[in-house]
């Protein structure tokens, strides 16, 4: 972790410092998940800035939450638990004792804790809503398709699979987490379970507007995938 004296005072340098903090932390944790790597972090940061320019929110909190929101991924993979809650605790430990505004740390933790798509509650703060929407936008569109296949490919799951007969809709977010471990799971199932009305579930008007565009592309892809899997093309 960078020492306190290494944190610059200028805002753009703070942004860079936070990204470097995320990079070194993920490297130390042994992160090997290419769907939740530094490229993902950088995209979420940029999307969060786009949303913040129109919706508001404390940019210092948003930057920190965006940079650190997935640092708990590897511990969840190894030990179980919820990476959002794990990451919130890790963020506090990383930021405490640095010149990062100490009074902002609880707000950063709250935004990270609330960012997960399968969470039981909606984000509680404006900064949390900005992070949530930015993170979900990176799960949509062409990038979203690619990331879904990175995740399921790592688990050796199928390119396409219909919804298993024993799964009765609607399903709870917690049950989706369980289904993700099944060998008959696939991105097409994830899309059907979680993405059907995702654009309208986003928290900000800007997020919903951007999500609708990305969702339309993604829906067309999975419709085509299903038709091809059935031999219709």
Image (cartoon, grey):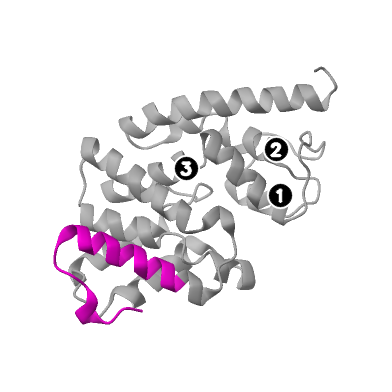
Position of residue 193 relative to residue 17, above or below, is above
- Does label 3 or label 2 sit earlier along the sequence? 3
Residue occupied by mark 3: 138
Q: Is residue 84 depicted above or below 193 in this figure?
A: below
* Comparing labels 3 and 2, the label whose residue is closer to the camera: 3
Q: Mark 1: few, some, or many residues within 10 Å (few <14, many ≥20)? A: some
Residue 46 position, x and y percent, is 34, 46
Are the residues flagged by discs 2 and 1 in contact, CB closer than 8 Å?
Answer: yes
Q: Who is closer to the viewer here, 215 or 124?
A: 215
Could you say which quadrant of the image residue 160 lies in?
A: top right
- Residues at marks 3 and 2, CA–CA distance in whole angstroms: 18 Å
**Quadrant in which residue 2 is drawn:** bottom left
Residue wearing tag 2: 189
* Residue displayed at 35% across by 77% down: 93
What secondary structure is the magenta-colored segment mainly? helix
Say which element carries label 1.
Answer: helix
């Amino acid at each position: 972790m960078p020492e306190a004296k290494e944190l610059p005072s200028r805002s753009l340098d703070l942004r860079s410092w936070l990204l470097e903090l995320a990079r070194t932390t993920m490297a130390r944790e042994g992160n090997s998940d290419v769907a939740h790597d530094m490229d993902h972090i950088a995209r979420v940061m940029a999307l969060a800035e786009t949303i913040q320019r129109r919706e508001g929110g404390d940019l210092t909190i948003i930057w920190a939450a965006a940079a650190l929101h997935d640092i708990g991924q590897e511990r969840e993979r190894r030990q179980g638990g919820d990476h959002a809650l794990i990451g919130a605790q890790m963020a506090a430990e990383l930021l405490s004792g640095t010149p990062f505004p100490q009074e902002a740390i609880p707000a950063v933790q709250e935004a990270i804790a609330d960012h997960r798509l399968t969470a039981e509650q909606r984000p509680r703060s404006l900064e949390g809503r900005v992070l949530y929407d930015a993170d979900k936008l990176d799960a949509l569109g062409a990038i979203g398709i690619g990331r879904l296949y990175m995740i399921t490919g790592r688990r050796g799951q199928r390119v396409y699979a219909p919804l298993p007969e024993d799964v009765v809709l609607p399903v709870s977010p917690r049950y989706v987490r369980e289904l993700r471990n099944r060998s008959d799971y696939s991105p097409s199932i994830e899309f059907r379970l979680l993405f059907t009305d995702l654009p309208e579930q986003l928290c900000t008007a800007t997020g919903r507007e951007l999500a609708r565009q990305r969702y339309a592309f993604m829906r067309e892809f999975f419709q085509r995938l299903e038709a091809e899997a059935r031999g219709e093309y």
